[in-house]
Image (cartoon, rainbow, N blue to C red):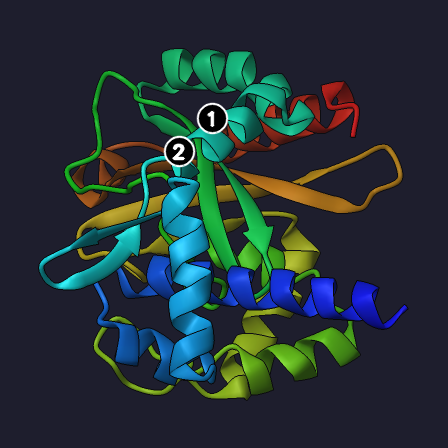
Amino acid sequence: MAEQKTNMRSLERAIDVLEVLEREGRSLRLSEVAQKTGLHIATAQRILGVLEDRGRVERDHAGYRPGVALVFGAHAFLASNPLVLAARPVLQELADRTGLTASLYLRSNWVRVVVARVEGSKPLRYQLPFGRRLPLHLGAGKVFAADFDDEERARFYTEAGPLLDLAGNPIEEATLTKDFAEIRRLGYYVSYEERQVGAVSITAPVRDRDHALIGAITLGAGADDIRSRDVEPLVVEVRQAAAAVGQHAIM
């Protein structure tokens, strides 16, 4: 039993190291990895050595960074996740019908991430890389946060870090709570330049057959592209796409 606990702790520490490197987005010195993970420097060095041997970490003149072998895991996820597989043809049809960029988001703890996307005839004017952590309190992320119960919402406000708007100003919890209630009432959310200047998104929740929230479908566009169009038909398109993905995904 003691050996099992030790092995589990070693696994947790290795994941902590990988998460620190992933969040920072730059090479870190050994001392920085140890400081950010709370590990003894010798322990951090030993873990980094194992991860480097397995290709999950690489080393350069500046320190340690995520390794190329991590891409294999990401590919396996995208190739096997039932929600991603169900969403791809739906996103293609949605992009073809609207001319806008259609995306699937999944939630991981207090952030969201895009895992599938089809560009429309009017591609986005800004980058939205796969795998980037995006907030739940801005833009399309609010669809996830709106689904929290009272206890989970309280934890979100406490643990998600500073909840700031695009200009860096704090957002009042009461304001977010009001937004979340409106999203639950409407069943979708239209965001105007909340997370990105010049960007608009229309988002609907993807729910499984038990009505549990499992993802979100978003149409993204430049603000100028949306201003010249009636939003309501686009809302209908997004909600229908989200419903179709939820019905076809076998989780």
Q: Which residue is mark 2?
A: 71
Mark on residue 140? none
Q: Between 170 and 29, which is closer to the camera in this rendering?
A: 29
Disc 1 on helix, strand or loop? Answer: helix
Query: In the shown orientation, is residue 136 left or right of residue 126?
Result: right
Q: Marks 2 and 1, how far apart in space?
A: 6 Å
Out of 29 and 75, give the one closest to the viewer.
29
Query: Hey, what amino acid is under mark 2?
Result: Val
For the point 68% across and 24% down, the residue is 82
What residue do we see at 58% from left, 26% from top? 84
Quadrant of the rendered structure where residue 103 is? Answer: top left
> Would residue 56 be visible to someone looking at this image?
no
Which residue appears at 52% of the width and 17% of the height? 88
Above or below 170: residue 135: above
Amino acid at the residue labelled 1: His
Q: Residue furthest left?
A: 61
Residues packed near mark 2 inside 10 Å, few (<14), some (14 to 19) or many (20 plus)? few
Identify the residue under disc 1.
Answer: 75
Q: In the image, residue 7 lies at what x, y percent?
A: 71, 62
Please report contact status of discs 2 and 1: CB closer than 8 Å, yes or no. yes
* Quarter location, residue 53: top left
| Residue 150, quarter of picture | bottom right
Residue 66 placement (x, y as % from top left): 32, 50
Q: Is residue 185 visible?
A: yes
Task: Work out which quarter of the rendered image holds the C terminus and state it.
Answer: top right
In this rendering, position of residue 21 left or right of residue 178: left
Q: Position of residue 158 (x, y in %)?
A: 58, 87
The residue located at (37%, 40%) in the rendering is 55
Q: Is residue 129 above or below residue 22?
A: above
Image spot of residue 247 (x, y percent): 77, 23
